[in-house]
Amino acid sequence: MNEKFPARIYKENVLADCFADAKRYFLQAYLDVDFAHAVMLAEQKIITEKELKDLLKALQSLDLDSIKRAEYDGTFEDLFYYLQREITKFCDDDTAGKLHTARSRNDIDVTIYRLHLRQDTLKLIRSTMDLRRNLLDLAALHHETLIPAYTHTQPAQPSTLAHFLVAMAENLGRDVKRLQRAFENMNLCPLGAGAITTTGFPINRHRVAELLGFYAPTVNSYASIASVDYFTETLGATSTLLVNIGKFAQEFLLMASMEFDVIRLPDGFVQGSSIMPQKRNPVVLEHIRAIGSKALGQCLGVMTSVHNTPFGDINDVEDDLQPLIYTDTIVRRENLSFRIAHQIVANCVKTAIENKSEITHNILQTVAREVLGREITMSETELAEALSPENFVSIRTIYGGTAPGETKRALNVEREYEATDQDWFQKTTAFIENAQVKLHDIVDKITEN
């Protein structure tokens, strides 16, 4: 027996969920698209001023709370058709129908997706900027705070907390730039592309883009509908950010362990054990890592879903997705190859471990005679200086190094980037907010007459 559309199982398992999601995420975007499209149609003399006023008043009369409570009953296909039906309660059918002139569900959908995604992307950019600022603020307090730097989870060289944190901030700065570029590529308006080949009506796509706070319209109408890189680029940037966040969390988890014992979390961010009173479990870092991993999995899941879909209008991309301490000192002083210097230091470390002692001047000279056939010119005082973590840090004044003067310089650069990003963020949000105000001012002025 053939069921008429929509079949019960399709309605209950697909369409109902899509309708609920559309109400939750895209309702206001739908209305803004309708407002902007209607204003443009009248400005282009495609509809009359009276029709425009009637349409705008009808849209303003919609009971949004009631719409949000509506259940999917199968008498309409999706939110688009539901809203079309609701509009007819406040204006005649013919006028309501004219709202759909020169557009398709296809270009409406990809437009509302971008409208919503750009808001989420701005929130993510703001949060990433905040995290970077917090790391920079903390780094500013710790240019002289010594910590071990690790390679292969083993203590390698002395560093400072400032150097460590500025490294993370530098990563996050690139994440901000990636997200900004994704935003800029996303914030283009597909409305007017129609189903995939635009329309024969003399519409003004630039005007609609302006009214909706887009930088400009998209260009090729086929690509406007078929391209998904407006969100896959965002997902790519987000995935890279999440990988960085996961690595940061893992590093802090290791450093907070009793074995590493480099950092100590405040009591408010650790949990004790019900049976072991000595435990200080860094649970907040574990949650950060787990949530980041879950989000990364979701990003990769979406990528997997769309990677082999056709380059055209397709549901798959629509409703259902949306090193050792002083080796280099010996190299500099003795004019030796790094390989030879490395061998001397390695043998010194081995001998010291066997003797259960520190590396002494006697051990150094004994090993040097074994490797070089002669002693080296380093005195006991110079050896002590070479072994000093403070000295190790302070002499690394090379660009990107650990010396306090260099980390202060790097911090200043990051602050400049931060200021640039702050300016970008403020201008972008103001640009969008101004567009919204202008659009609704136009609507209000028309409907007040």
Image: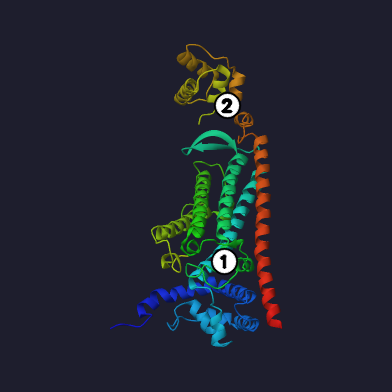
304 or 248: which is nearer to us?
304
The quadrant holding residue 7 is bottom left
Q: Secondary structure at mark 1?
A: helix
- The answer to whether 398 is drawn above or below residue 331 in the figure is below
Q: Residue at x 47, y 11 (%)?
A: 373
User: Is residue 75 toward the left or the right of residue 97 in the image?
Assistant: left
Q: Amino acid at mark 1?
A: Leu
In the image, which disc is placed on residue 115? 1
Q: Please give the residue where the numbered disc 2 appears in the rendered image.
A: 387
130 or 230: which is nearer to us?
230
320 or 270: which is nearer to us?
320
Q: Judge whether residue 146 can be spotted in this image.
A: yes
User: Is residue 396 toward the left or the right of residue 154 in the image?
Assistant: right
Report, in whole angstroms, how far the alpha carbon at label 1 lies from the one at label 2. Answer: 58 Å
User: Is residue 80 toward the left or the right of residue 443 in the image?
Assistant: left
Q: Residue at x 38, y 80 (%)?
A: 6
Q: Residue at x 59, y 73 (%)?
A: 37
- The answer to whether 357 is drawn above or below residue 135 in the figure is above
- The answer to whether 397 is drawn above or below residue 222 in the figure is above
Q: Judge whether residue 69 can be spotted in this image.
A: no
Residue 443 % position (x, y): 67, 77
Q: Nearer the viewer, mark 1 or mark 2?
A: 1
User: Quadrant of the image for the N terminus?
Assistant: bottom left
User: Quadrant of the image for the C terminus?
Assistant: bottom right
State yes or no: discs 1 and 2 in contact (Cβ < 8 Å).
Answer: no
Q: Amino acid at mark 2?
A: Leu
Residue 416 % position (x, y): 68, 46
